[in-house]
Image (cartoon, rainbow, N blue to C red):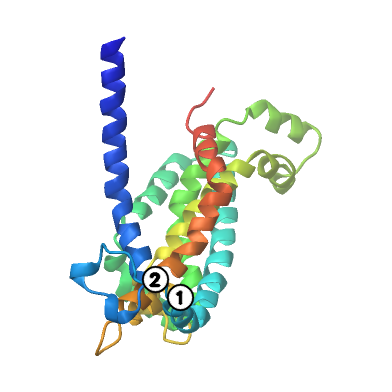
Amino acid sequence: MAALRVTSFFKYAILLGLAVVFLSPVYVIVVTSLKPLDEVSLSTMWALPSSIDFSSYSQAFAELAPNVMNSFYLVIPATILSALLGAMNGYVLSKWKFKGADILFTLMLFGMFIPYQSILIPLIQFLRSIELYNSIAGLILTHVVYGLPITTLMFRNFYANIPDTMIEAAKIDGASFLGIFRRIMIPLSITGFVVVAIWQFTNIWNEFLFAVTITNSDSQPVMVALQNLSGSQIVQWNVQMAGALLAAMPTLLVYIILGKYFVRGLLAGSVKG
């Protein structure tokens, strides 16, 4: 009994230590964002502010607000489209298999491992040819196409657990291809949509490389604008930290609101039977 208590003590002590290490950057960000600029320095980065100052938040919000809206204009349609197309692909590849379906699925999965940098030049040339370069629409198209492999994988694994007899019964009742998808598959895969939505929302919101190369200053998302907060002469670290917190708030809220469905949705598509 005593040995078990000692083991539990060390286990929780290790977990507590790891939590402190993990949360220490968050502490520095929050503390720095609440300090006036003259109190920000490497020697005092761990110290609490002498007085709480929210001016850095108002300045960061004023500079980031237009780009935050650009991010919402980007993330919401890109997430919805990639989720719907991924669900359709997963539906076809799991329940309406055709000759070569497994080969096509394998080739799609290779898309997850293609580095962004390797396709930047042909991507920009393609977007210019269809007149979507320097636009949010072009960025939406990029993220939808690049997100299809992972969304297809998630939905294919999820739909593989749905009994084929249910699909056969719907066919006997006269349901069409799209009718089965709309009336049976989508209602049964709400948790799958939540998982994909969280995954895509987070990835697209935090993505930087496509955003900085495909869009100009008028349509750049918030992550590019956050990098521009550094300035050219003096780095206002308190404003940058406040901007980082403001930019991270939407993804944090998504995880707080929908986080309990995330693991549930992942497990729903992980084991068949």
| Amino acid type at mark 2 | Leu
Specify whether 260 is left or right of 35. Answer: right
Residue sitting at 32 percent across and 44 percent down?
19
Image x and y of residue 164, in percent: 63, 28
Count of labels in the image? 2
Q: Nearer the viewer, residue 52 or 65?
A: 52
Marker disc for residue 34: 2
As drawn, the residue found furthest toward the top would be 1
The residue positioned farthest toward the right in the image shown? 173
Q: Which amino acid type is marked by label 1?
A: Phe
Mark 1 neighbour density, 10 Å: few (under 14) some (14–19) many (20 or more): some
Residue 137 pos. (x, y %): 53, 76
Label 2 to label 1, Cα distance in Å? 6 Å
Say which mark, if any, is on residue 231: none
Residue designated by label 1: 54
Seen at 49% across and 57% down, the residue is: 252
Q: In which quarter of the image is residue 80?
A: bottom right
Q: Do the residues labelled 2 and 1 touch (CB within 8 Å)?
A: yes
